[in-house]
Image (cartoon, rainbow, N blue to C red):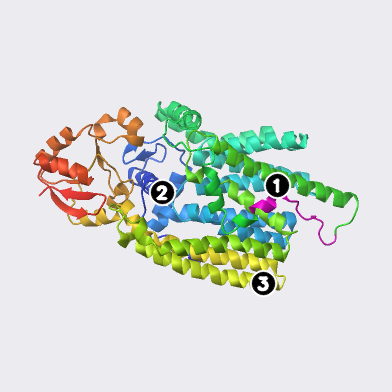
Amino acid sequence: MLAWFGTLGLRALISPDEGRYATLSLGMVQSGDWITPRLNGLLYFEKPVLQYWIGALAFKLLGVSEFSARIWPALAALFTTLAVGLTAARLWGRETGIRTLAICGSMTWIMGNGLYLTLDSGLALWLTLALCAMLLAHRPGVSASAQRGWILAAWAAMALAVLSKGLIGIVIPGAVLVLLCIWQRDLSWWRGMHWVTGLVLFFAIAAPWFVIVSMRNPAFAEFFFIHEHFARYLTKVHHREGAWWYYVPLLLAGALPWTGALPWLAGRSASPVQEGAHAGAQAAAAAQALKTQRRVLIVWSGLVFVFFSLSGSKLPSYILPMFPALAMLLALRLRSASPRALRWQLGVPVLAWLLALLLSTQAHRFAGANSPVSTIEPMAHAVRAGAAIFLVGAVAAWLCLRAGRITGAVVSIALAHVFATVFVLQSHDSFGQLKSAQGPAKALASYLDADTPVYAVRTYDQTLPFYLRRNIVLVDYVDEFELGQRIEPGKSLANVDEFVQQWAQLSKGAAYMTPAAWQELQQRGLPMRIVYRDPRRLVVVKP
């Protein structure tokens, strides 16, 4: 827990995602409007509101800080891990539950998305809860009332997933249900969804905000449902395209330290018969249930991977919801894996950390004009320490396997990878400062008054409004602000000429810009005094 939460507030927020979502939540706190999201004071309808609400509540309860900004993704990743661990224990026994928890919590992609501020950690939690609830609803021996309760819990989780990131919260579970019924040639899961009660609960949770925000903002529905869903998936309008194999390396790296076990998923899992079970009909039912559960997890993982691989817009975090299901599949497979097989699996993460160790000795090769070696060296040192931590854990796991203690080995690998990865992620702050406005904001702190305008000229750092605790006037910059600027054009400046005119009339002002923009303005004779500068940007004030 200390490793998981202890470092959340020790790293500056970085642009774009962390700054964007922290600023959206902070904007709700500052404006008091908890219905219409605004980014840097401009209407922003790309995503639903649930995570903004949770972030705003965190700021109100814990104060405005990096820790508060990141607390929800970290909690979501923790709850996801606990959910799959407890579900596996209920379905397949305590030992498998412990292994599932260890595997899930140590997967690199779950940690990476949980320890930084993204939307996908929260989405993965709600989708995973829906998955777990469905598995528990259909386990052998469950009563009708308990099954109904689990089904309704799945509907509630899907509604919260929709409130977190849109229609994907219902598309993935719905598609899995359809594909499973086709594979099984059995409609029992479909018929058991309690459709009337479930849909009423779903819409009672998900619909109110969508209705209210649409009533207050006529442009919302078309932009959110058409532009941000169908156009994003079917076209390249967002300029985030990637090759068909885009997610393959992300899957292999994100599954570490369990990447070497992925080929095991092609094999069969051990029999689910547990102590006290009887032969005959009960054993057959348990075997059939395990077969169905495994198919659910396979369909879930495969669908997420293929669905986003076919999308016209790709981002690394999109496939995060497949990893909890993969963790459960791997834990199932471990039931029939030998200690010797697991020893061979250890070779993959050991080689990965050794490769990282080798690359850390070549830090100078990754440096450049915009990334000085001084910002990269701390990460290189952390990688060496992280490799040492993991190798010690790998030795401990090897000794456990020699003694036949598979669970002990799994926990050793997991803990070693968690501590090593957290250590490396923490060192990112030296480089992350180049993608954060924490430094520029500190440089401006003594200069700014409450009414001093701050401009962003031809560039924008998503963390700047968060660290300055105020909105920034955009100059000749559009990007994701196109809708907001079109509806409220007076909040931005369309070109540099307008900025020059305003700057000349100010008694005090500050501006954030690139070196190229500064050179252009200097040539135009604009009075400026530099108060902050690094290889990528600078901040000026009016002298």
Secondary element under disc 1, as helix, strand or loop, is helix
Say whether marks 1 and 2 touch (CB < 8 Å).
no
Residue placed most toward the observer, 252 or 39: 252
Task: Name the amino acid type tagged 2.
Answer: Ala
Mark whose residue sits in front, 1 or 3: 3
Which image quadrant for residue 275?
bottom right
Say whether marks 1 and 3 touch (CB < 8 Å).
no
Query: Where residue 161 sits: x, y (%)?
Result: 55, 41
Secondary element under disc 2, as helix, strand or loop, is helix
Which span is picked out in magenta? 262-276
Q: CA distance from mark 3 to mark 2?
A: 45 Å
Query: Which numbered disc covers residue 220?
Result: none
Which image quadrant for residue 277?
bottom right
Mark whose residue sits in front, 1 or 2: 1
Q: Which residue is mark 2?
A: 56
Q: If you read the primary sequence from the N terminus, does the residue marked by circle 1 or circle 3 appear first? A: 1
Compared to residue 436, the image places residue 211 above or below, namely above
Question: As drawn, is 98 to the left or to the right of 370?
Answer: right
Q: Identify the residue at horizontal 31%, vertical 60% (top origin).
A: 373
Query: Where residue 94 sits: x, y (%)?
Result: 71, 62
Query: Which numbered disc covers residue 135?
Result: 1
Compared to residue 412, the image places residue 50 above or below, namely above
Q: Which residue is mark 3?
A: 400
Report if residue 267 lies within the magenta region. yes
Residue sitting at the far right: 280
Which image quadrant for residue 104?
bottom right
Residue placed most toward the observer, 371 or 289: 371
Task: Name the amino acid type tagged 1.
Answer: Leu
